[in-house]
Amino acid sequence: MRRTRRERERSGPWIGVGGLVVMLWLVVSTVLYAPWWGIVLHLLVLASFVPLLRRRIATRPADAPWVPVYALAAWVALNAVGVLAWGWQV
């Protein structure tokens, strides 16, 4: 059990950064149905997770992979609001 925690402390920051890169790809792919200001809004929301990831890496590196999961939840929520309330067409 102890070894697993130590391994996550070493690999967690890399998984977190890689996850945010994947989220950047998802944000860019939103251009298929969202207007330009929706993409900018997505990028601003995604950029707000970068300082959170930096803090996680510095304080609790084993928990850094959770930051892209939070970013994914924010992406889904923003897309739901965009499609349902702002009329984005899928």
Image (cartoon, helix red, strand yellow):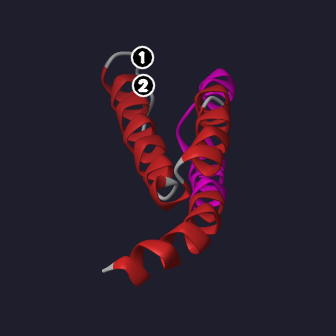
Label 2, secondary structure: give it.
Answer: helix
Residue at 37% x, 41% y: name it.
73
Front residue of 22 and 49: 49
Q: Which mark is residue 10?
A: none
Residue at 50% x, 51% y: name it.
68
36 versus 19 height, above or below: above
Front residue of 86 and 46: 46
Q: Which residues are magenta?
A: 19-41
Q: Position of residue 53 (x, y in %)?
A: 61, 44
Which residue in the protein does label 2 denote?
A: 82
Q: Determine if the magenta segment contains residue 2.
A: no
Q: Is residue 69 left or right of residue 34?
A: left
Asked if the residue under mark 1 is in contact with the one under mark 2, i.e. CB atoms within 8 Å, the reply is yes
How crowded pointer 1 is (Cα within 10 Å; few <14, some 14-19, many 20+) is rated as few
What type is the residue that disc 2 sits on?
Gly
What type is the residue that disc 1 sits on?
Trp
8 versus 78 height, above or below: below
Residue at 64% x, 67% y: name it.
14
Q: Report how far apart the C-alphas of labels 2 and 1 lie in the structure.
A: 5 Å
